[in-house]
Amino acid sequence: MKISDIQRLLGAELLTKTVNTDQEVFSACGSDMMSDVLAFVKEQGVLLTGLVNCQVVRTADMMDMVCVVFVRGKKPSPDIIALAEDCGIAVLATGTKMFEACGILYTNGLHRK
Amino acid sequence: MGEPYKVSFDVDGENFTSAGEASIQVKKILRQLGFAPETIRRVSIAMYEGEINMVIHAGGGRAELAVYDDYIELVLTDHGPGIADVNLAMQEGYSTALEQVRALGFGAGMGLPNMKRYTDEMIIDTKLGEGTRITMRVKTA
């Protein structure tokens, strides 16, 4: 699944301008606790979260994730978006709730076979 | 071989927003030195958790990175309150972090366990009222 597919499936707004959304993602993690995200490495993943601060982007960067989706209508501030662009991480924002967003991506094929 | 590559960082304990900046630097340095992505990820996650810990528990501290022939070493030193019960602190889910830290996405009691998970060796030297020094090593050969 591409980042652009995630954007379409979740009706999300793309907030980064410089990051390529043709990148493929192979796994996802949904959490508001960053240490839980850091506990389990997955390849080239996407992070879905309702937490909004710089640590979300840094956590994603540490995990080599390529996309962060802010759920539940959360909007990151410009400094968070700038940090993400600097790290090459695409940022999406959607009004969809966490459970629903994860379910949509899962049923559309974003999971290990 | 020659001297190990060494670099150190001050971790600002007053500023949660900047926490993790040193870890991002470490990650960039290890990339430049050409380490495997998996190695880079393990070292930087361990460093990041340690850095966050120093900010939320210890009022900041100092992080030192050293690259030896066959391993990478991180030494994190703080002058915080120390860890009362290391065995308890190593249990996943145990945390002394305040609610306000949890609201920031940390304090889930996964920091120290994650640091151990991603490193080959972790040594905790801690003394109540004096501080903590954590040495972590990741083998590269």
Image (tube, coloured by chain):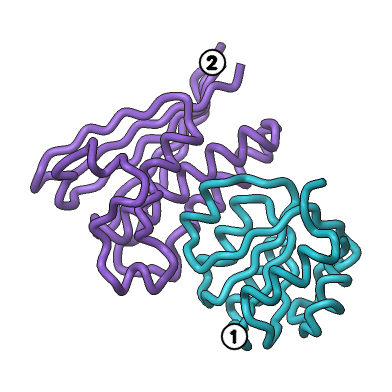
Chain colours: A cyan, B purple
- Considering the numbered disc 2 on the image, is that residue within a helix, a strand or a loop? loop
In the image, residue B10 sits, relative to residue B12, either above or below, namely above
Circle 2: residue type: Gly
- Considering the numbered disc 1 on the image, is that residue within a helix, a strand or a loop? loop
Q: Which mark is residue B2?
A: 2
Question: What chain is tagged by disc 2?
Answer: B
Question: What chain is tagged by disc 1?
Answer: A
- Who is closer to the viewer here, A71 or B42? A71
**Residue B10 x %, y %:** 36, 52
Snapshot quadrant of residue A75: bottom right
Query: Residue at 87% of width from left, 72% of height from top?
Result: A4
Residue position for label 1: A74
In the image, residue A94 sits, relative to residue B18, either above or below, namely below
Residue B141 shown left or right of residue A21 in the figure: left
Snapshot quadrant of residue B116: top left
Residue at the far right: name it. A22
- Who is closer to the viewer here, B72 or A14? A14
Query: Residue at 62% of width from left, 59% of height from top?
Result: A60
Label 1 vs label 2: CA separation?
51 Å
In the image, residue B70 sits, relative to residue B23, either above or below, namely above
